Image (spheres, rainbow, N blue to C red):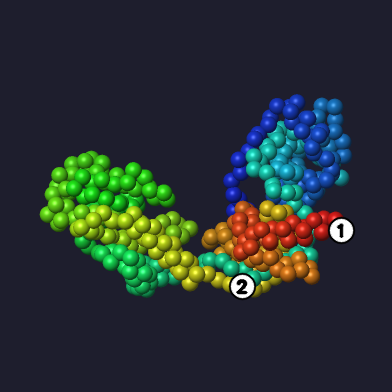
């Protein structure tokens, strides 16, 4: 019976590739033995058996004949502290599944695992209470009237500290040259003295636009300086506000503050940044999905998990945005909540296999300690 294997997502790895026959032979002799050697992209996760190593360095492998053909190539993998892949040229294979294989290369991932993974966890550990992004987000909440209402409401908090602040929306026909260039470049502007176009040399957390250089390049410096004098503008700040989703950054508003009497406090940029972050969080929260379904954990380490997924909604969300949070529950233990970044997704038959890296937790120190303790206990059984 043929089982279909499909790879949907694979985070890129950085490899050290070795082709020197002597070095390849040494690594095979010292590190590659009969346990934990698997055929890559094999739906049955077929573990290979090394029967013999010839004096010339060729390996006799026991392998399912359906997956090995004379004069073809195979890649096998083994995971120690680092992931290793070995490329073989199959010189011959008999009906019993004994293949004579010549090693062509070994590549070793530069990023290592936090700890080695523990297999055989199905039925012992489950993931549940998934929290993730909906596949189909409601764009009107971001770019429509409701998005503008939310931004205006959040802006009220900023007005208490900076009463001259305004919110301008990209759909408005008339923007000042300063607002237009902030919209075009995506960089904030902070001018402490409009007469000389003075600005801070740097500001932690912000890449400020050098407005004077921009106006000189566009040959409108004197025109803009005259406009500031006529408008009696002493200082001003411009901040483009973005909503960020998997497709990238989308401009939703421009914050603008000016003063005719004194230099604007640089904290105004921090407040605009906080407004942007709060807006993004509110939109994301309104476009998230919670599913409390139990899915098996097949293997795990202190750095991540391999998840067996049978729920289509989970896969739809994972392919849309490769992040989620979930509880991990070991038998007879309290759940541990973690945030995950998906590293790879593949499909074996009707089952999806999702590899995910642990990137955070609501109580990182305590939960990581308990995770380590639970994994150590299972490993000792």
* Residue 366 lies in quadrant: bottom right
- Where residue 202 appears, as percent x and y from the top left, is 36, 45
Quarter containing the N terminus: bottom right
Q: In the rendered image, is residue 211 in sight? A: yes
Which label belongs to residue 381? 1
Assign a secondary structure to mark 1: loop
Label whose residue precedes the other's in the sequence (1 or 2): 2
Which label belongs to residue 291? 2
Residue depicted at x 23% and y 56% = 262
Residue depicted at x 18% and y 41% = 219
**What distance separates the C-alpha of mark 1 from that of mark 2?**
32 Å
Q: Using residue 116 as the reference point, say whether residue 323 is left or right of it.
A: left
Q: Using residue 297 as the reference point, say whether residue 165 is left or right of it.
A: left
- Where residue 173 appears, as percent x and y from the top left, is 22, 62
Q: Using residue 18 as the reference point, say whether residue 163 is left or right of it.
A: left
Residue 201 lies, with reference to residue 27, above or below; the image says: below
Residue 162 lies, with reference to residue 26, above or below; the image says: below
Residue 171 lies, with reference to residue 11, above or below; the image says: below
Assign a secondary structure to mark 2: strand
- Where residue 348 appears, as percent x and y from the top left, is 69, 58
219 and 139: which is toward the camera: 219
68 and 189: which is toward the camera: 189
């Amino acid at each position: 019976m043929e089982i279909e294997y499909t790879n949907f997502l694979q985070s890129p790895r950085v490899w050290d590739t070795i082709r020197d026959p002597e070095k390849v032979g040494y690594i095979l002799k010292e590190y590659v033995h009969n346990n934990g050697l698997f055929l890559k992209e094999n739906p049955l996760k077929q573990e290979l058996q090394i029967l013999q190593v010839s004096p010339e360095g060729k390996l006799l492998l026991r392998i399912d004949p359906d997956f090995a053909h004379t004069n073809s190539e195979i890649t096998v993998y083994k995971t120690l502290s680092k992931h290793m892949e070995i490329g073989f040229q199959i010189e011959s294979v008999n009906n019993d599944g004994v293949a004579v294989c010549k090693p062509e290369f070994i590549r070793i991932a530069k990023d290592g695992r936090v700890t080695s993974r523990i297999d055989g966890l199905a039925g012992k550990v489950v993931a549940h209470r998934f929290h993730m992004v909906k596949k189909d987000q409601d764009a009107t909440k971001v770019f429509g009237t409701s998005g503008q209402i939310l931004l205006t409401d959040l802006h009220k908090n900023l007005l208490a500290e900076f009463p001259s602040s305004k919110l301008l929306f990209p759909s408005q026909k008339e923007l000042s040259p300063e607002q237009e260039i902030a919209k075009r470049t995506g960089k904030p502007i902070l001018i402490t003295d409009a007469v000389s176009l003075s600005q801070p040399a740097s500001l932690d957390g912000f890449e400020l636009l050098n407005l004077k250089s921009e106006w000189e390049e566009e040959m409108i410096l004197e025109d803009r300086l005259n406009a500031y004098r006529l408008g009696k503008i002493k200082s001003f700040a411009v901040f483009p506000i973005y909503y960020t989703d998997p497709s990238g950054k989308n401009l939703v508003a421009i914050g603008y503050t000016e003063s005719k009497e004194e230099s604007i406090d640089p904290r105004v940029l921090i407040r605009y940044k906080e407004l942007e972050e709060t807006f993004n969080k509110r939109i994301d929260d309104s476009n998230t999905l919670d599913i409390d379904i139990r899915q098996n954990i097949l293997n795990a380490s202190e750095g991540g998990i391999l998840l067996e997924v049978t729920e289509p909604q989970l896969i739809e969300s994972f392919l849309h945005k490769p992040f989620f949070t979930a509880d991990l529950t070991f038998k007879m233990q309290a759940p541990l909540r973690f945030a995950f970044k998906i590293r790879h997704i593949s499909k074996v038959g009707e089952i999806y296999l999702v590899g995910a890296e642990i990137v955070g937790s609501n109580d990182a120190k305590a939960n990581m300690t308990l995770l380590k303790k639970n994994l150590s206990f299972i490993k000792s059984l």
